[in-house]
Amino acid sequence: MTRSLTTAWLIAALLPLAAQAATVQVTVLGRDGKPLADAVVVIEPGAGAKPAAPAPVSTVINQQKMQFLPGTVVLPVGSKVTFTNHDSWEHHVRGTPAGLASLNPGTQPGFELRLDGKAEGKEPSSADVTLTTAGAVQLGCHLHGSMRGFIFVTDSPWTLQTDANGMAIVQGVPEGAARVRVVHADQLIEAPPVAVTITPVTALNLPTQVQPRRRRP
């Protein structure tokens, strides 16, 4: 077999494999029909081997001006979060399973931290947490009830947060039957997943009943 024929054979053999990796564009809408930012989109293929979980990362969530910043973050299982208090007064960090998961007796316990206020001329107080269990975590502060944050811990590479236009573009999704979940910090109960068929290029508009609460400026 000549080199050109060998190359052609390899390309022909690899084309079906390449076609299995699709690009999925998901636009999430709130109850008012407007794009919903900071929603977490999870695509669950219906069949086939589960891919390796994404590698853990290290990130920082700040407490500043009575807010968690960023307010929503998606992180792989095993990631380390450093919470840092930039306010001059004390804060707590309370992490609990979000939604109805908090009522499940088998749910992993959350975590609690205490962070002193930042003294002038000194480094801000901080503490670390390693996220070992997949799922949604609601953040709060015992001292300031208006402070809320949200972490979605994932073991899937097909999990992404929507941007300011309510859009998430997920790469490398297997073609075929799948389910799409949408999770949001202001959602009391997660809606049932939506059944879809993934093609090489798939665009989805997903309405929800989520009404995002007004954030501090």
Image (tube, rainbow, N blue to C red):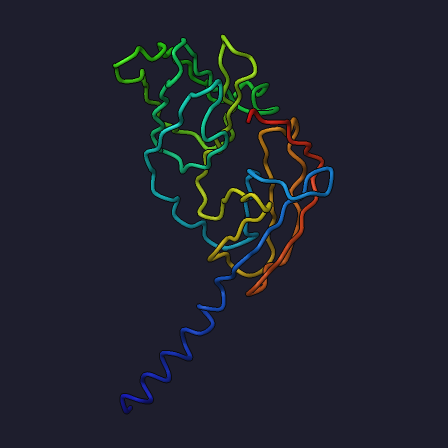
Residue at the far bottom in the pictured view: 2
Residue at 37% x, 19% y: name it: 86
The x, y position of residue 207, in whole percent, is 70, 44
Q: Is residue 39 left or right of residue 68?
A: right
Q: Nearer the viewer, residue 131 or 184?
A: 184
Residue at 59% x, 34% y: name it: 184
Residue at 51% x, 58% y: name it: 174
The x, y position of residue 151, in whole percent, is 48, 30
Q: Which of 16 and 66 is in front in this view?
A: 66
Q: Nearer the viewer, residue 212 or 8?
A: 212
Up/down of 16 relative to 213, above or below: below
The x, y position of residue 117, in whole percent, is 36, 10
Asked which quadrant contains residue 133, the reply is: top left
Q: Nearer the viewer, residue 85 or 2?
A: 85
Quadrant location of the C terminus in the rendered image:
top right
Up/down of 188 relative to 37, above or below: above
Q: Number of marks in the image?
A: 0
Up/down of 149 relative to 174, above or below: above
Q: Is residue 175 left or right of residue 129?
A: right
The x, y position of residue 153, in whole percent, is 45, 34
Quadrant location of the N terminus in the rendered image:
bottom left
